[in-house]
Image: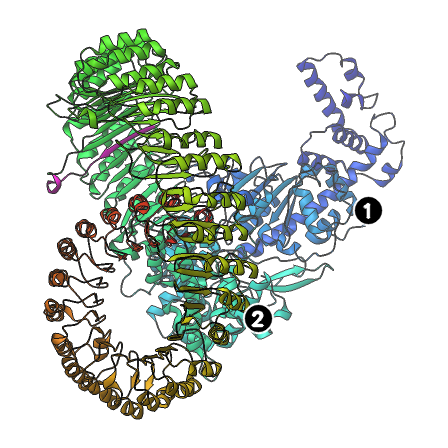
Amino acid sequence: MKLFQMMPSDAGCNINQASCNRSSAAVTEHIKGLLEYFRVANAADCRTFLQSMCVLCDNIPMHLESRLMSAAGYENSELSNPSVMAGKSSLPPSKQLIKRPRIDYWMQYIAEVIHSLQRRWERVSELLVSEVQLENVWVSVRTANRARVRPDQTPGPGDKRARTPEPDWDYGSMDSRVTLENFLQGCAGKVTVLVGPAGSGKTLLMSCLGQQWAHGLGPVPSSCLFVLLEFRQLNILSRPLSLSELLLRHYVPVKHSDHEKEAIVDYLLSNPEQSCWVLDGYDEFHNKITKQDLQIELLDPEKPLPVADLISGLLNRLLLPGCTLIVTCRVRDVLDLEGMSDKVGLLLGWDCQEIKEYVDNYFFKKGHSANRALGVKAAELLVSSGHLLAMSSLPALCNMTCICLEYLLLESRNPGGTSIPKERSETRLKVGESEKKEPQIRKLEDTEEGGYVQREDQGRSYEGMMMDGTIKRPPPPHTQAQIPSTLTQVYLSVLGAFLSRDLDTRGNNDKLNTMKLTDILSQHRSELGELSKLAWNGVEESKILFMNEDITQNVIEFSIRKGLFSQVELRCEDGMLVNSYCFTHLTLQEFLAALRIMTSDDVSDMHLKKRFSLRTRWMTRSDRRTVFTDSLHLFLCGLASPYCTPALVHLARTSGGTGGPIWVEKRQSLVLNLLTKLCQSNNLTGPKILELCHCVQESQDHQLAKQVVGVRPTLELRNIRLLPNDIDALAFVVNSVDNNGVGLDFRACSMDSECLDVLPRCQYIHYLSFCSRKYGDKFAEKLSSILPKFKSLRKLEFCGASLTSTGAASLASALPNCPEVTEINLSDNNLKDGGIKPIAELFTKLPRLVLVKLGQNNSSLEAVNFLIGKMSSFSNIEQIHADGMKELTVTISQKSDLDSHKTKCEPTISLLNQKWSRSDMQQLANSLARCPALSIVNISGGHLDVDTLRMLIEFLPKFKITKKIIVNDSGLTMEGLVSLTALLSDCPTVVELRIRLQSPAQVSIAFSGGRKNTNGVSKVLCLRCCGLLPTHLERVWRSLGTCPDLTFLDVSSNCLGNNGLRKLLDILPRLSVIQEINASNNGSGKERVVMLAGALCSQNSLTEIHISDGETEQVILKFCHGERDENHQKKLFRMNNSSLLPSDMTTLCKRLVLCHCYLELDLSYCLLTDKAIENLLKVLPKMTSLQRLNVSHSITSTTGALALVRCLNVSQRVTSVELRPHAESFITFDSVKAKETSCRLTHCSLQGDNLERLLDILQQGPKLSDLDLSSNQLEDEGVKKFVDRLQKLKITSYVNLSNNGLTQKGLLDVANALCICNNVSGVDISLKAEDRCVIWSTQYEDCVKTLSVTDSGLEHDHLVRLAEIMSVTPSPIKLEFQNNLLQSDWIEDFLKLLNSGQRGFSMSIDERWIRSEEAVSLLCRCLHLSSNIHTIRVHHTTLHLSLMESTELTSVSLVDCAVEGHHLASMKSIIQRCPLLTQLDFSYNNLGIDGAEFLCSVLPSLPNLTSLSIGSKEASVAVVEKLSEALVQATAIQCLNLSGHAVSDMAAKIMTRMLPRLRSLNLSHCEWSASGGLQLIQTLGECVSLEGLCLDCLQLNEESRMALAQALRKINSIRSLKLNKIATAMGPSQTNGVLDLLAAMEGLNRMQDIELNGWMMGDRGIEELTRHFPVWMELRRISLSKNLISDLLGEMLLEALKSCTHLEELHLPSNSLGDVTAARMALVLASLTNISVLDISENRIGHEGSVSLSKAIMCMKNLTKIDLTSVGTSKLCPVAASLAHCPLLQDVRLGWNNCGDKVALELVRVMPLCRKLKRIDLESNAISVSGAEALVKALQSCPAVQIIRLWRNNVSTTKAQTLSLKERRLNFSST
């Protein structure tokens, strides 16, 4: 009505009068009147009315408003006259004056934009091959956003901000695609994103959209301003711009005044919804757009801002809110726009039909029929090539493909070249051809930079792209061109095609040069070199546009003429237009960059390695953003193929023609090495595995393909989109495995049916997995069509999909054609019962099928019953497992005639968490009754009421079940429990019933295993946690009835109390075969102790009672039935974790007195008060049957321990007492009076009165074999008290006082025991870390007494006191000092004070400083100070002395102590004063000439010297030469050791004069010439008195060997012969020589010691050797290691040794002895009672041999050392046990046998019996921590043991350190 009111008063009166009438008819009349008036009104009135109407109407369409305002027009005079229309309009004057000019300027600008877009489209469409229609362009719309993660990877914490959407996963399927026109409908006011790979035509489509808008067509309203901005153009705008400058200066420049521009912008700001902004090519933008999360104010449009901020403001609605935005980009860039876009669509590629149409149009434009025919052949070739077909799905690359095919076809037709009509290529432009009036961003859509089809995730998605199947590729005829096999080869051909063209800029025909590719490359090498360098620099700098200054003019003209470049006009910031250039496609730039890398040294190897990586099409936020397609590494792999080598060589050659091949080969090798490392990597995710397959395919290297599948037998390609060429790449890799097979896991992958057409190319597939909701019946139907082609398929997964019974039937129809299938997984689908049945029919059709998974398919119990029914007809079903609706699995066993004799494994049925009714149970029971024998039936988790349970019990006797029925968590009641117990007596096959009613409820019914005769079968009843009361027990017993076979009864954790326990004891006589009753946790009181003790005494079959009151009450009764001697039957009463009052102790013990069987009383972990112990000791003498009392962890104080020690005086049957507070403590008894007693009282506080009380008890007690008082805090005072009373104690073996805080003062007190105690034989003390103090006793008088002091830090005063003590000791003394930090002068003083007397002393002092010159000096001072030294010797760092009063020095030795010859000068005067010296030994030092001269000077003064030893480690000629004459003169020498020296011929000749008088000669390891050695060997025949000969490791030739044999025949006096390894020195062919030497020993009847190690004599040699044994009656030692002695010859050897009755040492290591030899040892060694050393290490003795060997060891009472290292068996328990019969044993070696804890535990038992044992070697075995801990415990009672080696056992380093700290004698190191 406001419009009516605006009319002049004279015209609107009638209307105003009727204004009150609001009917529709009246309104119509008003409008007609209004129109009639203005039809004849003047222009001013009309203009005013129209302006007012446009202002008043807010929602008037833009195109209508524009036309009305244009029709209205205006005049300046009228506008300037405010009186016009005065009174006729209610509009404010300001609105009337503003809106009109804004609209006009706006419309003028729109007109200019329309003109610009039309001209733009004219340029673009001029070069198009086919017409662009938006209704024929297809888009896949992205679905609603949801949580998305990286493909094939679960993101870690560090990836949470770097997640990328899986683009393939968010776009609709091909069935839900829409046209681009429909996609853009409704985009007004929203942000719409159109994504697609480079070359898909995004820019062309946006240009087409603009052209349609210019014509008033398309989805964008023509009233909107269409703003088309390209990001590559925006990149050059570096300075800040306002919105006005961006629009009116950069987009479409206008030459309006500032006022007009302001009006345009003002209108835009006032009406932002009237604008549509198209932002094209965001992937090329140098900046990154981010979403503004915070709500901030709108941006000021007049404020200059960086371009990135302007674009960000538009997208974030901070500029022009309400405007329409369309953004194009690649898929990987959508992530940047996340949260800003309202709609996202994927531009789909061309399908096969569209590609064919394009190819047809391309060749049709050639203009004659020949090209049409060429087009048909091109289409055929294109469809036959996967790479070309994939490329052609993108328009830009399709054009390149056509050019390539044209070249290849014409080359094959006319090798000489051809001329074709001019082709306006979509990828070329002439130099300088540009429009000067406005910027020209690019000439055509296919110049858009980006990746080729294989690099973009969606670029390869095209409809109808049939690689196999639907579109059958005809085989190319022989006349057709050869299609490249890889993408790299395709691009190489494309490059050749471009280079072969010559576009005539004047419009004439294009010339096509069809020379060979290599010739073309050579022809244009220089231009390609510059282009490739430009391409590489662009890749490095992320640059795709190049200016004139970047390229030389001739290369620009060449590149555009050849079609390699496109020309682009750019408008600079100053408005000037400049030319720039880009490669036809980004992939072409990357390909040329790869050529640069492979043919030029511009790129270093390090740079190549840096650039070479697997760049997948799935990217994260952290990945580097690049404009390129990441195809560089693919091209590098392709160029590394030998197929590309010739082309690379032509490009790489220098002008001189050399260097090319070498460089190319180097680069190709580098790329292949990098690819090899990736192939061998095992941490690649699915996308990178797929990319790796593409790389390997490009390389065409089958060995690399084998490495890919060698590292990963199953290729897991999860959560990614797959396309046919992906499958093609997989096929290349997969087919390299031959028959080994490989798996493909497509879990959650997006895959079109075309991929399935290609999938059969993958041969040898053994595993296929398809898991995605996208896979439904159609996919299954398609899959079924190709499954028969997978003949080696073993496992198929189609789970987590949308499969129904229809799809299942399809798969079931195809799978019988895959005979190797073993596993099928169809879980998590929607098969229902109907879909289960066709799958079940496969059981008999697939002979190798073992597993079928059908869970989560909405099936019911009917399907399960159907499967159970299959058991009766198909006996191979092994298991049916169903868990509610979640799981349904069928397991099938593979049975054949070959294994029919094996035990048949019955099937199992598991139906968990089912909803049971009586009818369901009846149906199941009927099915089970018809089944063959079943193993287990599990129906747990389903509620069973009483009726349902009774139905089961009713049918149960009909079941053929061999193991058990499980009915856990089934709501069983007490009534049901009583019913079930009757099964034990009513159903003979039921042998075990276990019921638990409390949570978790459990019921198990076990059967007899299919045995027909069940008489005498043990039966078990377990009713734990059932809440049983004594009354319930009576009901159970009545229901059980007569069940005589009940052997185990468990009623624990109930509520029976004392009454229930009494009832159990009352029924014991009725349980004739019961073995165990468990009545624990029943709330019984203390009365049970006496009750059960009485039962133990009265019930003969009751043998064990276990009672515990710890965390859980325990009452267990164990029985032993059968006829036994009551007097020898053993019984155990164990009461743990209880508190026994003194009165309870008395009652219990008195009741146990009535027990007449051997009794063990276990009171461990009980709190025993002193009074309770006293009461125990009172009754103890009456407990005559007690054998063992266990009070471990029951003694809490020293007082209690001392009280128990009194048992030694209370009972004469005590054999051992081992007491330790809060630890294991035992007292053992003998049946009668004990012969010897052992006492260990440790870790007490024996100070003051406690020690006195203990000594009083011990003094009154019996004789003790050993007493251990270690770790009792005695300290020096307590130790002194003990030593003072030691003489009164009756101790026969040792006293252990270790770990008592002893100091040097206490050490002296203990040493004094040697003087004051006649029975003390030795004292062993170490005060440092070991804290060891042991006093050894003996029963013999006048024995040698030993004092050993180690690591005790003795001072001078301590030595003085020790000298005093030792001097008054009446017996001979042996002193041993080791590492006591003694100084030289202290030793001298100690030696002065010693009074040796007639008894004599022997002393050894070991200190590190006793070496070299200090050793000589100390020796000299000792000889100077004491005239009683009988012998003196320094060996290594130990000084050995023997002193005897009134004796002369007879022996001086300095052995292996680093003495040099010049050190001996100080000894000369002393040695010369010792005429009675008989032995001189300077072996293994560095004597040299000085030492030889020293010996020459002293030998004349030693007339009684009989033995001289100067063995050497290093051969020296000078020493023997110097000494030879002196040795001849020393006629008294009878024993000579020259081992290790070099003997010259002269020295040998001289020595032959002295050898005949020798009795012992050692020439081992000597070096001499053949002649010199022969002289010496021959002279041996004259040594008629020779008793000892050692010639180890001599190099004997044949002549020397014969001489030695002759000499041996002449020397009948030999007692010791050592010829180790001389046979090896003679050589392996000297078998006869070995036999000759053995035969020469026939007359050596006095032989006592023989060593022939390393002779490799074999059987013949052993036979020869054994002939001598009968006459070697005095043989004491024999060593035959490494002599190839077989097991049978070993038996012969042992048999021959029977005559050697004096044999003491037998060494047979490193041979082939076995069980036969060991068996002979058991017979022979029993008669060789003198053997002390047995070494049979490194042989092949088995378990039987171990048993035989143990029998032999039992007879070896004098054995001191046994070496069984690496004997070939770990079962050495019999051997370890037999060592208990060897009381003199000192060294045991059982290493490298893989022995376990059993052997260690057997040694633990033996160790206390071997009192002299010092060393045990158990290295490299399988002893665990428990075995090591047992050894630690055993060492506590074995003070003589020095070390146990445990290196390389099953003990961790940490635990080994802990055990070593606990017991330092355990050694876990390798040394």
The residue at 20%/34% (across/down) is 843
Residue 556 shows which numbered tag? 2
**Residue 1212 at what x, y percent from top left?**
32, 32
Q: Is residue 91 above or below residue 789?
A: above
Judged left or right of residue 1855, residue 59 is right
Q: Residues within 10 Å of mark 2 (few under 14, many from 20)?
A: many
**Residue 321 at what x, y percent from top left?**
69, 37
Judged left or right of residue 828, residue 843 is left
Q: Nearer the viewer, residue 429 or 244?
A: 244
The residue where tag 1 is placed is: 259
Q: Is residue 1440 above or below residue 976?
A: below
As shown in the figure, which amino acid type bears the numbered disc 1?
His
- The answer to whether residue 918 is seen in the rendering is no
2 or 1: tag closer to the N-terminus? 1
Q: Nearer the viewer, residue 1660 or 1283?
A: 1283
- The answer to whether residue 36 is seen in the rendering is yes
**Residue 344 at what x, y percent from top left?**
54, 40
Residue range in magenta is 887-900
Q: Is residue 1488 above or below residue 1354?
A: below
Q: In terms of secondary structure, where does tag 2 sit?
A: helix
* Magenta-colored stretch includes residue 1828: no
